[in-house]
Image: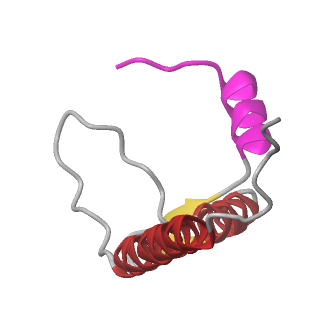
Amino acid sequence: MNHEAQNLASGRLARIAAILAGSTAIVLVVCFFLWRMWVTAPLPAHRPGEPNLQAQPRSDLERFRREQRNADQWGWVDREHGIARIPVERAMQLMAKEGRQTP
């Protein structure tokens, strides 16, 4: 009658546990360095033929909306030369009233 052995191969289990712990530590260290390189990497310069991605889209959108609001107001572009800015709707009304005059 052969019975199963009651003793465990604790040396083998300890080596497997050490290998798993070591490989996990190595992966975490590699991930940490890759993350630091990714976070601190400078943005590449825009090259012709590639899409021009925005670095700060939210602030760009706010600036664009502010410019659009200012474009719909009356104001001087160059007072010295008599160039003024008027809302587009008003300019369209003036053009329709005067008609297109070609020399």
User: Closer to the camera, 82 or 40?
Assistant: 40
How many numbered circles does the render carry?
0
User: Closer to the camera, 96 or 89?
Assistant: 89
Relative vertical location of residue 42 with respect to residue 50 in this rendering, above or below: below
Relative vertical location of residue 71 with respect to residue 29 in this rendering, above or below: above
Give left or right: position of 101 versus 44. Answer: right
Tell me where residue 103 sits by quadrant: top left
User: Closer to the camera, 27 or 52?
Assistant: 27
**First to last magenta residue range:** 88-103
Give left or right: position of 9 versus 48. Answer: right
Is residue 24 inside the magenta stretch? no
Q: Name the residue rendered at 74%, 51% in the picture.
A: 87
Relative vertical location of residue 31 with respect to residue 71 in this rendering, above or below: below
Q: Name the residue rendered at 29%, 75% in the picture.
A: 42
Provide residue 44's location: percent of width, then percent of height.
Answer: 25, 62
Can residue 99 be seen at all in this image of the molecule?
yes
User: Closer to the camera, 13 or 77?
Assistant: 13
Give left or right: position of 12 versus 2. Answer: left
Q: Name the residue rendered at 66%, 29% in the picture.
A: 95
Provide residue 45's location: percent of width, then percent of height.
Answer: 21, 61
Q: Residue furthest left?
A: 48
Dominant secondary structure of the residues highlighted in magenta in the image: helix
Can residue 74 be seen at all in this image of the molecule?
no
Q: Name the residue rendered at 43%, 50% in the picture.
A: 53
